[in-house]
Image (spheres, helix red, strand yellow):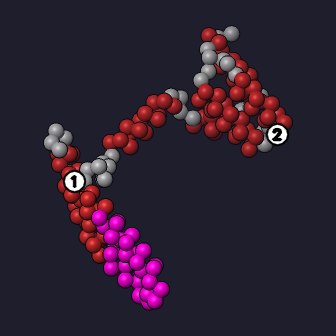
Amino acid sequence: MSARQEIRVSDGERQAAVDRLRAALDEGRLDLLEYDRRLLLAYQAVTYGDLDQLFVDLPVTALARTAPSEPRQAVEAAAARLLSRPVPVPNLPLILKILWINWVVVVVINLTVWLAVPEADYFWPAWMAVPGVLLLGASAGVNAVRNRRLVIDPGTR
């Protein structure tokens, strides 16, 4: 027996085994009773040896081959990619944040008044889209300038 067989498994590895069993069920390699039995054993597994016993009569599936060998590193790499992207709202200056809040409040008030007036034939709150588009353009422009400055000189902000 190899030393790997005696090493304890993590919750993530148990979940990967459950996913592999589900794939085997979907492929028709296991019936529902056998899947249920192996599922119970997978959640009760303590070591790699316990998990390996669940797959001795099953081929390696595409799911098992594509699973990352180091899931933690894959998650950390994905998180690093997401965090490296510019975030538009926190980069906005305070004045633009205040203007956005004011615009939303005015739109809500206009919609409320329009809904409260029973004889309103014309949807006049649509005119609030004009300052909204202008505000969106200003925010996008400021964000683009700030992101370009961060790329050119990361020390200034």
135 in relation to 36, above or below: below
Side (left or right) of 46 relative to 100: right
Q: Nearer the viewer, residue 44 or 134?
A: 134
Q: Tell me which amino acid carries mark 1.
A: Pro
CA separation in Å, label 1 and label 2: 58 Å
Range of the magenta residues? Answer: 102-129
Magenta stretch: dominant SS?
Answer: helix
Q: Position of residue 7 (x, y in %)?
A: 61, 14
Mark 1 or mark 2, which has the lower sequence index? 2
Q: Tell me which amino acid carries mark 2.
A: Leu
Side (left or right) of 17 relative to 141: right
Is residue 117 a member of the stretch shown in magenta?
yes
Tell me the element at label 2: helix
Q: Quadrant of the N terminus?
A: top right
Q: Which residue is mark 2?
A: 32
* Number of residue marks: 2
143 in relation to 39, above or below: below
Q: Nearer the viewer, residue 106 or 130?
A: 106
Q: Position of residue 108 (x, y in %)?
A: 39, 70
At x 17% / y 48%, what residue is drawn? 149
Q: Position of residue 128 (x, y in %)?
A: 33, 75
Give the number of the disc on residue 93: 1
Q: Position of residue 140 (x, y in %)?
A: 26, 60
At x 29% / y 64%, what residue is drawn? 102
